[in-house]
Each structure stands twice: as structure tokens, then as C-alpha cells.
Image: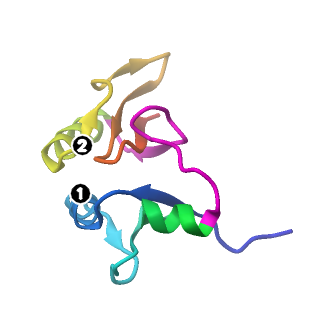
Amino acid sequence: MHPKMIWANLPVDNLERTTKFYTDLGFKQNGTPNSQLTSFIIAENEFIIHFFLKEVLKSNMKIEIADAHAAAEIMFTLSAENKEEVDEWAAVVTKAGGKLLSQPETFGDSYYGFAFADPDGHRFNVFQM
């Protein structure tokens, strides 16, 4: 098996808020938002995350959807070139309405980064390695 692509589908409560948040972070929209989803290209390798209204995703998947505010269903990691870029990410995330889960700090011998949650609780790391 050799899939041509992989993408993520995440539930959200408010498509307008989600579209504004990820646009404010500088991500490129993947197509035009509609009444069920908004979609973004997250990195240069064109990793895509679709953000579906929670009810739509639950109906299509036929399973319960985890509450991302209560538990992490996944944590995405975004790369940064240097410590300054990590600090810039922290400022932009905060300004856009995200919640810093940790402040930028050094980890181990060669990592610098922080964690944040988007307005729906989906978790991300930003790391310089």
C-alpha cells in the first residue's frame, strides 16, 4: 500500500472562528470554506488539515468525537528555523486567540519550543531543533 497523500480531519464548533485563527497564523486555505468545513495547507509538504463542524464529522465517522479541551487526541509539531521564529510563533498564536500551553523554553540538548491549543483545543508544538 502506498497512499499518495495523508491529511487530518478535526472537529470544530465554529468555522468562522477557525478560518480566522488559521488565516491569522499565516496558513494557506485549501479551497473555499463551505457550510461544513474549512481547510488549510499547513506546511511546505502540503500537509492538509480539514476542520469539519463537529456534528458533520461525528455523523460521517459514526463514532463519538473526543473533547479536545479535556484530552489530547493528537499533537501536531510545526518546525521553526531558530529560537527567534519560535518566539514569533508564540506571539502570533496568542494574538490570534490561541492558548499557550507552555512558554517557549529549552528542552534537552538542542530543542527550543512551546505548545499551544487552537480555539477548539487542538494541540500543536512549535520546535526549533
Between 38 and 60, the residue placed more toward the observer is 60
Predominant secondary structure, magenta span: loop
Q: Residue 32, relative to residue 51: is it above or below?
A: below
The residue to which callout 1 is attached is: 21
Residue sticking out furthest to the left: 95
Residue at the image point whose x is 22% and y is 60% from the top:
17
Report the amino acid beneath label 1: Phe
Q: Does 35 lie within the magenta span?
A: no
Q: Which residues make up the magenta segment?
A: 61-82
Q: Which quarter of the picture shows residue 13? A: bottom left
Element marked by disc 1? helix
Residue at the image point whose x is 27% and y is 42% from the top:
85
| Image marks 1 and 2: residues in contact by CB distance under 8 Å | yes
Q: Position of residue 84 (x, y in %)?
A: 24, 36
From the image, which quarter does the N terminus lie in? bottom right
Q: Position of residue 34 (x, y in %)?
A: 34, 81
Instruction: Examine the rendering and report whether any part of residue 129 can be seen.
Output: yes
Dot 1 alpha-carbon crowd within 10 angstroms: few under 14, some 14 to 19, many 20 or more = many
Task: Tell me how far mark 1 sits from mark 2, CA to CA.
Answer: 8 Å
Q: Earlier in the sequence, mark 1 or mark 2?
A: 1
Element marked by disc 2? loop
The residue to which callout 2 is attached is: 98
